[in-house]
Amino acid sequence: MPADASPFTTVIGLEVHVQLLTRTKLFCGCPTTFGAPANTQVCPVCLGLPGSLPVMNRRAFDLALRAALALDCTIAPFTKWDRKNYFYPDLPKGYQISQYDLPFSSDGSLEVVDPKGAFPPRRVGIIRVHLEEDAGKSMHDEAAGTADSRIDLNRAGTPLVEIVSQPDLRSPQEARAWLNELKLLLVYLGVSDCNMQEGSLRVDANVNLHVPRGDGSTAKTPIVEIKNMNSFRSVERALAYEAARQWEEWQRTGIEMGKAPKQTRGWDDAAGITRGQRHKEESSDYRYFPDPDLVPVTVAAEELAAIRAAMGEPPTRLRAALAEKWGIPAADAAVIVNQGRDVVAYYETVAGLVGEGKPAANWLQQDVLRTLNETGGTITDFPVGPAALADLIGRVGRGEFDTARGREIFAGLLTLGRAALPADVAAAVAALGITAVSDDELTDLVRGLLTANPKIVADVKGGKEQAAAGLIGQARKQNPNVNPGKVREVALTLIRAM
Amino acid sequence: MQPVELSSVEIVTAIRQGDVSAERVVTAFLDRIARLDGSINAFLVVDREGALAKAAEIDRRRKSGQPLGPLAGLPVAVKDVLCTADLPTTCASKMLAGFRPPYDADVVARLRRADAVIVGKTNMDEFAMGGSNENSAFGPVHNPWDLDRAPGGSSGGSAAAVAADMAPATLGSDTGGSIRQPAGLCGITGLKPTYGRVSRRGLIAFASSLDQVGPMCRSAADCGLLMETIAGHDPGDATSLDTAVPPYTQLLDQPLAGLRIGRVAAHFAAGLDTEVARGVEEAFAVFKAAGATIHDVELPHARYGVPTYYLVAPCEAASNLARYDGAHYGHRCGPASGGKSAGDGATAFDSPLVEMYCHSRAEGFGPEVKRRIMLGTYALSAGYYDAYYAKALRVRHLIRQDYLDAFATVDVIGGPVSATPAFRLGEKTGDPLAMYLVDMYTVSTNLAGIAGISFPCGFTRSGLPVGFQLQGPALSEPLLLRAADRFQHLTEWHRRRPAGCSV
Amino acid sequence: MSLSATDVAKVGVLARLALSPTEVEAMARQLSSIVGFVSQLEELDTTRIEPLAHPLDTRNVFRDDVPQTCLTTNQALQSAPRHDGECFLVPAVLGETGAA
C-alpha cells in the first residue's frame, strides 16, 4: 500500500545490538569465537565469580568509537559505565555492565537512499550508541518437557554496541533498507561481521501508528516493542504484521498511547505473527549506578582524529567516489558498493584493466552478480577472475565479437571447474572458431551484399538509414564472426560513396 | 624466645639466617592455633598439611642455597574474604559454604610468590558486613583479651589471631574500618592502605569503591614488611594504582621532628569513652614529646560519615551480592523450600526460577547481609536514587574535600579509632543502628579513599586495649608506618599479650 | 521517613529475597530507623556539589585485546549447584524476558 493512500503513518524506531570484531571479550581475555562447545570460553570474570574484576578491552572501545563516528555521532569527552541490575541466569553477576546517562556517543544519523526510488531518501537520527557486555545463552527444550534450562556462558561478556535510532522510519520496507545500509556500513568499517545467524547483529523494533483525525490532530497508538526477529526479512514482515495488527486494534478499541503500558511482543517467524510477552512491572527498575570496578574514559580530539583516519571510506562516500572515478551512474555505483568491499575491489580491477568504467559495471551487474546470485558463491572465489573478465570485455569493445558471443564465452569459462585466466578467454575464442574479420574482408563482403540488395541501398539513399540493419543478418550468415555494428558502419559508408 | 613471640620481621630474619627452621616456626603457630582457637574461633580453616609442606619446601630450598622470597617461612593467615584456590573461601557465609574459587586473589598470589606460608583463613563478619564479628555464619570470634567480648569486625578473626599469637601476620579488608577497628579492639596494628594501593582482584567485593586489603600485625614495622609484598599495580584491577611501591621498612627509621599531627576537637565530644579519650590524649603527648607538633583541624562533615557510608556501601553491596543467586555457584535452596514459604502465606512467585532465587538468597544470607541488601536495593530503586544514593555521593565529595583542606595544614590526623573499648558479645546485636555507629571514626577514610593506621595506645583499667588512629593523605603509607613505628619505639603497648593466651 | 510492609515486600521482590511476614515486619521497622538516620544528610545543602562515586581520579584504564587462558568446563562448573557436564542447570526459563 503506498504511504499516501494509507489511513495511518507507521512510525518505527530500531534498537540494534552489534557484536564488535574483537578477539576477546569486553572485560576479560576469553575468546569470542562463535560455536565453541558450551562453557569453554569462560573465566572467573565472565562467570561472575566472587572477587573477579572487569578490565576494559581497548580494541572494543576503539571499534565502538569507529561505529559512532561512522554514524556521525557526537563523541562525549567523558564517559562511564553503569551497572544495570536484574536477575537472570544468563547474567551471572546479577547486573549487566552498560551505559546509562553518559553514553560515549549520541546524536548521529544514517541516511538510506533507495537506488530505485521505492521510498524518498530518509535520514534516520541516531539517539545514542553505547558500549555494553552481552549476556550468556539460556536454552530450554520445551519438547523434552524437562524442568531445567541449560545455561552456556560463552557469550557472556562479549562486547556489543547498542545503536538506538530515532523513530524516523516510516515503513517496514524502509526499516529493512536502513538495516541493510547500517550493516553495510559496519561491515565496511570492520566494526562487526553483522552475522545475524550467529547473533552478532540483533534488532528490536519499536512501532506505533499515527492516525490523522478529522480535526487535524493526530492520534497515536500505544508503542509496541518487537523482539525475536532473526533476519532483516523478518523485521520487515514483523513490522508489516504489527502495523496491520495495531490498525485493526485501533479501529476496534481506540486505545491511544499512554492509556496502555508499552507492550513487548515476540515475532513468530513460522506463524508470521507477533505474540504478547510477559512483562513484569518491577523488571524495569534496573537501579543503574556507576560501576565502581571501572574507571571513566575520556576521549581526546587527537584520538578521534586517529580513529577517523584509520577508519576507511564509508559506503556513502565510496558510492560517490566510484561513480565519479569511473563515470558510471549513481545507481550502478550503489549496486556495486552494496555488495561489499570485495566486489568493489573486483570491479575496480576490471575497470582499470579495461580502461573504462561502464562496460565493466554492466558485465559485473548483468553477468557476474547474477551468476553469484544464482550459485550463491562469493566474489573472491568466483571462477572468472578480474583479469579474464577484463580481457573478455576488451575483446568485445574492440569489436572482435559481439556481446552475445561474449556471453557464450563467459558461460564457458564458468564451467572450466577452475579459476579462468586471460589465456582461457583466448582459447575459448579459438574453440568457438571466432577469428577477427579483417577490414578488407568485411568491405568485400558488404560490397557483395549491396549489389544483391538494391532496395536497401535505395532506401538508405532515400534517408531511411535503419534499412541497413537488413544487411546484418545476411552478413552473419556468410561469416558468423562479423561484428554487426561494423557491418552497418561499412554499409553506410559505401552507400554514401555510391 | 619462642617462635610465637617473635615479630614478623624477626621471623623472616631468623629463618633466612638459619637460626630457626620454617618448619619449627610454622609448627609452633599451628600448635598454638590447635590449643587456643577452640575458645577464640578466629579460624574458619587451618591448612596444617599445606602449611607444613610449604615450610619444609622453604627449609629445603634454603639448605640448597636457592633464593627465597622476602616473606620466606612467615606464617600468614588470610581473611576468608580473599580467594584461595587451594582452600575454601566462604566470606563466613552459608551462601558460600564449601566454595572453592578456581583462582588466587592477587594478594594471595603475591604472598605465595614471596614464600609466605598461608596457615589458614580467618573468621569475619559475613561478607565483611559488621563491626563485631557476630555476623559470621560460623560463630562469633572471641576477643583474646576477654573472651566474653567481641574482637570488633569485620576482620575480627584476623585481629584475634594476631592478638592471641596464633599468627604473626594476617590480612584483613577494610571497607569502613574493618581492619582498624578490630585492630584497635584487639591491641594490634592494622593498616588500611590508600584505595588502589593493593589490588582488589580476588577480594570478594562488599563495596567496591571503599574496599581495600591491608596487613594486620603486631607492629607497624611488620605491617610495612607485608605491604612491600602485597602492594603494587595489578593490571587485572582497573582501580589499582600504577605507582611504584616504596621500600616501607627502609623508610621507618627517621625522626618525627616536624611532623604536623592534626587533632579534631569533635572527636572528643560526648560518646567517647573517658578511658579511650585518656589513652588517645596520652598518645598525642608521646608524639609531641618525640618532636611532632599538634594542630587543631576541622573535618566539618565528618559527622555525616556514617549516614553517607550506610548509603554508599549498601547500594554497592546490593549489586555486588546479586551474583549469589544459586544459579552458578553457592547455596541453592532445596526443592522443598517453595512449599515451606507458601504455607507462611508470604509471596507467590512468578516462576520456579524466581522462587529458587528468592529462597536460595533468603537461606544463604544472614540477617545483617539481608538488611544491607534491602537498604541498598531500596536506596537505588526508582524514585529514591537522587534522595539517597546521589545525595550520599555529594556528601562524600564534601567529606573528601574536608580531608584535602585539612592536609593542606597538617601531615596526618590523629584520634580515636573507636569510641569504646571492646564491647560484650551480644551487647549490640539487637540494634543495627547502634552497631553502625561503631564505625564513626573510620568510615570517612574509606569514603575519601585515603590511608589510615590503627595501633595500641593504652589499656583500660579492666585490661582492654585502646587504639589510636592516624589518617594520612593518599599514598601516605610510608609516613603513617613511620609515625606508628616511632611511637612503638617509645611505648610498649603493642608488646602486651592477653593473659589467657600467654605462651 | 518510614517504610511500610508493602514497601519492604516490594524491595524484597527486587532484591530476590524471600521474606516471611514476620521478617517483613521486622525489616520494615529496622529499615525505617536506618533510613530515618541516613536522612540527616538532608540537612546539608549539596545543590552545587558534584556526586563523588569513586575516590580515584584515574581515567582510561584498558587492557589489550589479547586472549588469555580460559577455565576448563569442569572448573567452570565445579561449584555449580546443578549441571550436566556442559551447562549450568537452573529451573526452567520460560518466556520470561531478561534485559529490555
Image (tube, rainbow, N blue to C red):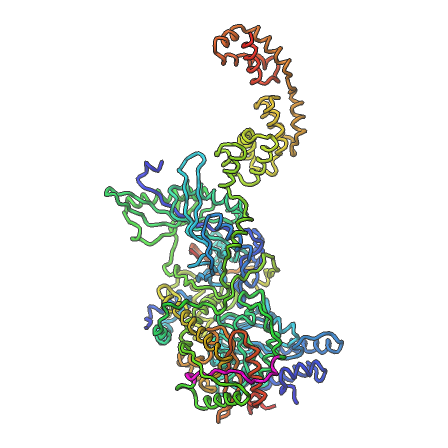
Location of the N terminus of chain A (image quadrant) = top left
Residue B140 seen in this snapshot: no
Check if residue B262 falls in the magenta segment: yes
Task: In this rendered view, identify the residue nearer to me: A426 or B91.
Answer: A426
Query: Where is residue A315 drawn, in percent x and y?
Result: 50, 41
In the image, residue B133 sits, relative to residue C93, either above or below, namely below
Question: Does residue A394 appear to the left or right of B425 in the view shown?
Answer: right
Residue A482 seen in this snapshot: yes
Query: Where is residue B213 drawn, in percent x and y?
Result: 54, 74
For the record, the magenta segment spans B251-267
Numbered-mark total: 0
Q: Residue furthest left?
A: A215
Residue A430: quarter of image? top right
In the image, residue B449 sits, relative to residue A342, either above or below, namely below
Query: Where is residue B17 drawn, in percent x and y?
Result: 71, 82
Task: In this rendered view, identify the residue nearer to me: B388 or B247.
Answer: B247
Task: In this rendered view, identify the residue nearer to me: B487 or A376.
Answer: B487
Task: Give the residue drawn at x 47%, y 87%.
Answer: B421
Task: Give the residue drawn at x 41%, y 45%.
Answer: A124
In the image, residue B425 sits, relative to residue B53, either above or below, namely below
Query: Where is residue C23 drawn, in percent x and y?
Result: 38, 73
